[in-house]
Image (tube, helix red, strand yellow):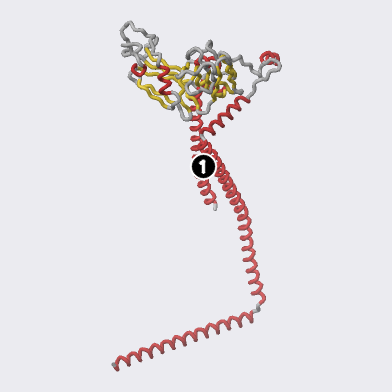
Amino acid sequence: MQIMSWTRPCHGLDWSHSLFCLTLLLWTRRMTGLADFSNYLSRIITSHSAQACDGQPLRLHCPRHSTISIQSAFYGSGEAWLCKADPDPPLRAHNHSCSAFTALQKLLSECQSHRHCQLPVNHLLFGKDPCPGTTKYLHVDYKCKPTEHKRHVVCEGETMILRCKPPKVLNIYAAVYGRSLGQTDTCPSRLTRPPPFECLNHEAVHLVSKSCYSKQKCAVAVSNQTFKDPCFPGTRKYLSVVYSCVPQTLLREADPYVFSSTSSPTVDTKKASPADLEAHFPKGSRRPDNSGAMMSTSLLTYAYIKEHPEMAGLLFTSSVCVGLLLTLLAVSVRVTCRGRQLRDHRLAPKSHVQVVNCQEEDDDDDDEEGTESSLISSADRTAIHGWEEVTYVSDAAERAERIERREMIIQEIWMNAYMNGSSC
């Protein structure tokens, strides 16, 4: 019994080891999913850049549920010699500031609102060669615009106001000033007819980003004084901005230099005196608390579940299954150990009682035999012994008589067989 009690828990350890491995696997999958989600957030929040020299392909890429939003594009030789043919080129008189003015429009027509984009860098792609005989390069700045975003349109002469609820801040993906084809209902003009072509200023994104990026609220005056007029005089234009509200903590982690100039000095509330706290936080203002971090975590969780419902359901189901298996294992181990303890506790007194009872029964049998032998007299004992001898003798005589009869029958059979054989 002791050997069995020590060998069975080994199977329990095997089960616990398997469950531990399964839990570790699920936890690894979960961490991998969270890492992928963190990479996704970083990709859609931060700005990206790509560069390729003449004769090389330029590749732009955005993750799932996002598209490319071109911010700027430059094709030319620039001020820096980035595509050197040899380490120490000879000094030649080249115009290193030349560029193709059609670079931005070409990138917008080829890569805007796509997930993947690949272009061969060549001066033929942008029309006339801006710098003949000079090695040139293409540099592109872009963002990954999420599929779920906000769009705000304000007509010329008005003020655009963008705001986000704290602790979220603004992140600008695209801004266009001008007028597009087919949008006659947007900011209509009764005096002049809309032009039969598009007149758009895509560089408005830089001015809007400068005024609104990483802020909770901003105001931009929509006019020709703020943005360069891309249309004919008299054309009524509008400003269209694509943006989203992102948690401030995420934007700070992705772009920590944005808040360095506008951040206020921190005060240690544990060591600071009440006078310092009153000086740092004016009367009537609310002190910051940890609700922003908690809200950011909740938003991250909600965004992850919304973007990956299958993975979230799998993680939830796996967690429930692992919890049930661990609970079942704990209950089975507890019941087994408790049952063995009770059984061992019951068997020990019972065996002792059985040994005592057996000894008592042997003593009782001996006492009874002694009592019975003492009650029978010597004459009766002699008569009983004689009767047993007579019975034994009679049994022996009957056995001998049966043997003799059997031998006689066998002799008769042999005689009959012999007589039958002689007659033939």
Q: Residue 421 lies in what quarter of the image? A: bottom left
Q: Residue at x 51, y 16 (%)?
A: 192
Q: Residue 299 lies in what quarter of the image? A: top right
Q: Residue at x 35, y 91 (%)?
A: 416
Q: Nearer the viewer, residue 30 or 270?
A: 30
Q: Residue at x 52, y 20 (%)?
A: 240
Left or right: 400, with 211 as reference point:
left
| Percent of width and height locating residue 92 | 32, 6
Circle 1 Cα neighbour tier, 10 Å, few/some/many (<14 / 14–19 / ≥20): some
State how many labels appear.
1
Q: Residue lying furthest bottom in this view? A: 423
Say which quadrant the C terminus sits in. Answer: bottom left
| Percent of width and height locating residue 127 | 35, 16
On screen, 408 above or below 34? below
Residue 209 can be seen, yes or no? no
Residue 222 can be seen, yes or no? yes
Q: Residue lying furthest front in this view? A: 191
Residue named by callout 1? 19
Report helix, strand or loop for mark 1.
helix
| Percent of width and height locating residue 368 | 65, 71
On screen, 87 above or below 240? above
| Percent of width and height locating residue 110 | 40, 23
Left or right: 120, with 47 as reference point:
left
Which amino acid type corresponds to the residue marked 1 in the rendered image? Leu
